[in-house]
Image (cartoon, grey):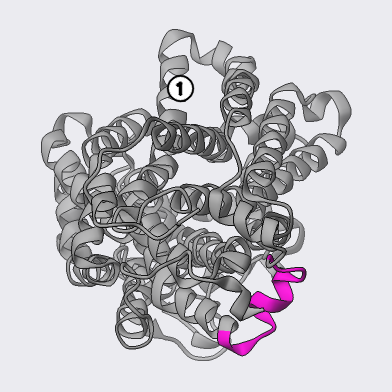
Amino acid sequence: MAMAATAADKVRPMTREERKVIFASSAGTIFEWYDFYLAGALAVNISANFFSGVNPTAGFIFTLLGFAAGFAVRPFGALFFGMIGDLIGRKYTFLVTMTLMGVATFVVGLLPSYSDIGFTAPVLFIACRLLQGLALGGEYGGAATYVAEHAPAGRRGYYTSWIQTTATVGLFLSLIVVLALRLSMSAEDFAKWGWRVPFLLSIILLGVSIWIRLQLQESPAFARIKAEGTHSKTPLREAFGRWDNAKIAIFALLGGTAGQAAVWYTGQFYALFFLTQTLKLDGTTANIAIAAALAIGTPFFIFFGWLSDKIGRKPIILAGCLLAAITYFPLFHALSNAVNPALEEAIKKSPVVVVADPAECSFQFNPTGTASFTSSCDIAKSFLARNSVNYANEAAPAGTLATIKIGDKVLTSFDKGKAGAEAKAKEDAFIKDATAAIRAAGYPAAAAKAQVNMPVTILILTILVIYVTMVYGPIAAMLVELFPTRIRYSGMSLPYHIGNGWFGGFLPPTAFAIVAATGNIYSGLWYPIVVAVMTLVIGFFFVPETKDRDIYADDSKKA
């Protein structure tokens, strides 16, 4: 079979078989992302049911640990299933990953609560999250590779851009399902059993997705090299044990997927986190605003995928990183003014200072939720960061307790590690006094709905989503084109999932730690900006343009 495209291939209409390939691959991947994001959308309910044996704050932290675990293991899923995909085939591998994801998600909906089976409940929940993360690590590379290997040259960006919509559509779907259930029943019923429904629905989606994918054939590129006996027998060793291939993976990560992930997670996850945790917007309104922006912005994945076939992958991806780096600060300032103008006013009129011994101030990076920050400085800064209070840092003599200056009022913090039996009482008293002081200084407990400028909020969020579409729309085609067919599944999966699972997945805790350290509610944006700039520089100098590559070249020469 001649695999190289002719000039006619670049302009011919999409065939029925190609439409089926794209639909089946996208539908299955949407379903997997939907499953994966439910744990984040329902974190409060999961905490109440599976971690009720500890205090609510610790329970929520352990729930986030379960969510983070899914991100952490994605690269390991990429290695394992990437190897299977290069050994056995694309089709059967992503059938396995999809089934694993669906079953794990369905089981979460059935798991007994902590009150029923005790500590076994959270252990089983985290085990399900680990299985989901492993499955997702294998799914994306298989779907993107499968679609790209069916696409004619000159249209791979457009064809694979449909796969790129799936993460956003999966997130959108999870938000819509949860929102619809919340609005259709009482809060009590939702907390008691309604939160399980989205997980249980996944078994229906799983059945439909498997039925659709079973009708597909193996990708022609892999089928050819398998028939010729030129497929790799040791894909992991060949992809990452040989420098000529390993360096491609390194540049693909640092000059591509790391920046893409930082922009992606900032525009969708961190934006939601910023709305609810920093600007104190209620969850329902925040979800509606994000969902509206996603609905408006999602078609741009297709547009930028199509455009990358015309002008190249690099210009669009790097332009997205550049725009993000330049405009994040003004955009998030504008978002604050649109959502919670009272907070912006308090920041301007009521400056706050933390006076503390620098030696006892930690960098509160806590991606697993298990670290303990007990010094008077950490307690003071953590309180202010959680309550979106900007503050300046001032050094105090060694050994003194940290204080918070709010106007002419001075509050003394406490050292939890030295408080002993009085720790709980001291913590309650400190939080009560500090809360009263910041409220008196004008820092609001929540965003006033009447003051939220919803059109401007959605506009700003849509701009952030469009940046996401710029960096994400062409990335699958670029990754596919960087690696030869014999190691393509393994080669592209690992840098993608390290970028998105680690650089992206740990963005919120990293941003919080930066905010707590600096005292500026916007300083967490430095993390995605620095990563985006790194990708801009490395991508410009070290990542080649790939749009005109023949991905069907004879792979036997690379054995």
- Residue 83 screen position, x and y as percent: 71, 61
Residue positioned 63% across, 64% down in the render: 490
* Residue stretch in magenta: 231-244
Looking at the image, is 442 positioned above or below residue 509?
above
Element carrying mark 1: helix
- Residue 532 screen position, x and y as percent: 33, 73
Q: Is residue 288 left or right of residue 176?
A: left
Q: In which quarter of the image is residue 455?
A: top left
Q: Quadrant of residue 297?
A: top left
Looking at the image, is 508 positioned above or below residue 124?
below
- Residue 180 screen position, x and y as percent: 41, 17
Q: Does the magenta stretch include residue 34?
A: no
Q: In this view, does 98 lie to the left or right of 353?
A: right
Q: Is residue 245 left or right of residue 274?
A: right
Identify residue for label 1: 177
Q: What's the residue type where badge 1 is placed? A: Val
Residue positioned 28% across, 41% down in the render: 298
| Front one among 18 and 373 | 18
